[in-house]
Image: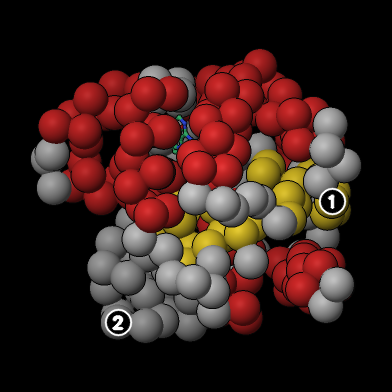
Amino acid sequence: MRIVLLGAPGAGKGTQCKRIAARFGLLHLSSGDILRQERSQETELGKKAQSYMDSGGLVPDEVIVEMMAGAISNAPLSGFVLDGFPRTVNQAAELDKSLSRAGQKIDAVLNLEVDDDAVAKRITGRRSCPECGAVYHIENLKPKVDGKCDNNDAELVQRPDDTLEVVKNRLENYYQQTRPVVDYYNANSQVCNIDSNRDVDEVTKLVIEKLESFASV
Ligand code: AP5
């Protein structure tokens, strides 16, 4: 299966993609995680992306398209779930072109819908593990021990772009540049909307049920 998960910042894309990948044996490809890894390794790509990410802007399409095409080409035959990509109509069209060259296509597009006022709370309360990437929330998804990762006891950290000011920019960019990607996929009746205002496990149930119905067709 080749799946795209769309949604505003903080909609729960990363949280749900990890669960989808585990359930269906897919590769989880998060453009944000790949960029953060490039930054921590101080690569040229990471340096190029830094200022865009810190201000909540989008990294230029040509950089992202090349980066994600490389990641997708290493995906297993079972497939992948894309998180944070495509984020512009141009990225979506380039993705379709490169999959089509390989005789492939996107099988399912899920759009996580969340209210704007929930976004700020989710993002400012997010904490993640710098070692294994596990994501928590100070109220909604607490670790067993306050401030420590359940998997390895590492000290949880807050992303530098998870401040209220940057969230405002990220949301503005979402409405201007990423929301039109939903219409792009809707033109082929590919989008399934999921209510992501519900609690995490309820959203997972909806997402998995939907994908199981696609898989059984
Ligand atoms: P990226 O890392 O992709 O950030 P984002 O899209 O803003 O998404 P988030 O990671 O903030 O949220 P999420 O939807 O994954 O939510 P999560 O599951 O963590 O991108 C970062 C930056 O990189 C961009 O701003 C841009 O600069 C650049 N970039 C990346 N991709 C790009 C591209 N394609 N083109 C150009 N630039 C690109 O959940 C959030 C919190 O809420 C967590 O604490 C979680 O525990 C909690 N939570 C999750 N679900 C629920 C729920 N149902 N109820 C309550 N709490 C919940």
Residue 17 higher or lower than 6, as above or below: below
Q: Nearer the viewer, residue 112 or 25?
A: 25
Please tell me which residue is depicted at 32% across the width and 70% down the height of the picture: 132
> Mark 1 or 2 closer to N-term?
2
Q: Residues within 10 Å of mark 1 (few under 14, many from 20)?
A: some
Residue 205 visible somewhere in the drawing: no
Residue 129 sits in quarter = bottom left
Q: Of 206 and 95, which appears nearest the observer?
A: 95
Residue 67 x/y as whole percent: 33, 40
| Figure quadrant of the N terminus | bottom right
Kind of residue at badge 2: Asn
Rate crowding at label 2 as few (under 14), some (14 to 19) or many (20 or more) other CA atoms within 10 Å: few
Q: Is residue 121 left or right of residue 55?
A: right
Q: CA distance from mark 1 to mark 2?
A: 36 Å
What residue is disc 2 on?
152
Q: Residue at x 83, y 78 (%)?
A: 216
Task: Name the residue tied to disc 1.
Answer: 192
For residue 26, above or below residue 45? below
The colour scheme applied to this rendered structure is secondary structure
The kind of residue on which mark 1 rests is: Cys
Q: Residue at x 66, y 38 (%)?
A: 8
Residue 97 in sight from this viewpoint: yes
